[in-house]
Image: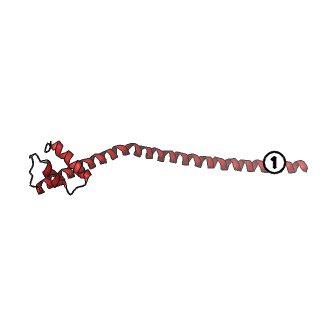
Amino acid sequence: MDEEKQSKSLEECAEQLSSAAKALEQVVGKLEAQYEALNQKIDRIIAVVEKEPSRMQEKVEAGVESGLRGRRTLVSRLLAKSGIGEGVEIEAETLERALSGLTIEQRIAVKAELARAGAIG
């Protein structure tokens, strides 16, 4: 009888181990699927990040061009208010009066634009 109990006990243990092994196989399968899905998401994120600098560069360039157009418009308006037309070299005193309402940074930007346009020396 003792041997019979041990035999049944071993059979039960073997069945439990078999069930545990099957459960582990299922868990490993699910983990592998999740790992693969995660890798795909990471690959998509990397692709977007690699493309992003070029998109950002395009946005920066568009913003710079827009800013230059805005600066040119500002310069034209300021000069028109001061009675100065295009193609005329501007005197320093007249320019200072025209730019008096701007911040120092804006004055520098306007003067740089005027210098590029050849309106000031």
Q: Amino acid at mark 1?
A: Leu
Q: Nearer the viewer, residue 120 or 117?
A: 120
Query: Extreme right residue here?
Result: 1
Quarter placement of the C terminus:
top left
Could you tell me if residue 73 is visible in this image? no
The residue lying furthest to the front in this view is 93
Residue 74 position, x and y percent, is: 18, 54
Give above or below for 104 relative to 117.
Answer: below
User: In the image, 95: left or right of 62?
Assistant: left
Q: Position of residue 117 (x, y in %)?
A: 15, 43
Residue depicted at x 57% and y 45%: 32
For the image, the number of numbered tags is 1
Q: Residue at x 9, y 48 (%)?
A: 86
Residue at image point 79% right, 48% down: 11
Rendered image quadrant of residue 77: bottom left
Q: Which residue is mark 1?
A: 10
Q: Residue at x 81, y 48 (%)?
A: 10
Q: How far from the left and from the top, in percent, is residue 115?
A: 17, 43
Towards the viewer: 91 or 25: 91
Element on which disc 1 rests: helix
Depth order, front residue of 8/16: 16
